[in-house]
Image (cartoon, rainbow, N blue to C red):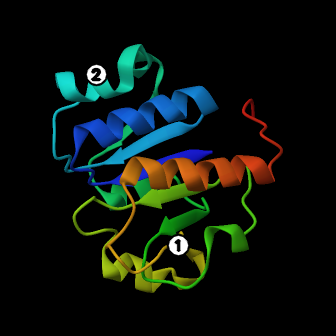
Amino acid sequence: MRIVLYQPEIPYNTGNIGRTCVLTNSELHLIKPLGFELDEKKIKRAGLDYWHDVQLFVWESFEEFLENNKGCRIFYATTKTDTRYTDVKFNQDDFIMFGPESRGIPEDILMENPERCITIPMLPLGRSLNLSNSVAIILYEAYRQTNFNFYN
């Protein structure tokens, strides 16, 4: 599996997500601009001693990411769809993209890919779940569907 963070803003979330990626053998793709430096203590603290093992890819832009991953299947996590993350069939080589904490994936990207937009059901009491929690929820469902095959 491959996790994509589009312009992440909070180093602690990215560090936590990096740790989850290491322990599930998942790639972590970061699309700039980032709201922090990758050498900040905060990201390393959140990722603990796992950060050096992250399969990390950093892209200058969404366009560069797409150019280098042609033909890939990307699911877009958003609150702006009715399709639940449990309603899709994940494959081992899928990308799952999450937007920045303060605003989510841009509308134009979502509108170009409505058939790949997925959401986590929740009560309408807040805007969204924490980013690192959302990644863990959807990533583990994807792995559940592929029989927790962490080694492909």
Residue at 33%, 39% in the rendered image: 14
Which tag, 2 or 1, sits closer to the chain's start? 2
Q: In which quarter of the image is residue 79?
A: bottom left
Residue on which disc 1 sits? 119
**Residue 130 percent coordinates (x, y):** 36, 55
Q: Is residue 24 above or below residue 64?
A: above
Left or right: 145 in relation to 6: right
Depth check, front residue: 138 or 73? 138
Report the Cα–Cα distance between label 2 and label 1. 29 Å
**Residue 47 percent coordinates (x, y):** 37, 25
Q: In this view, does 10 lie above or below 100?
A: above
**Residue 129 percent coordinates (x, y):** 39, 61
Residue type marked 1: Thr
Residue on which disc 2 sits? 45
Left or right: 86 in relation to 67: right
**Split into 4 quadrants, where in the image is the C terminus?**
top right
Q: For residue 125, say whether it is visible.
A: yes
Residue type marked 2: Arg
Residue at 27%, 59% in the rendered image: 101
**Residue 138 percent coordinates (x, y):** 58, 56
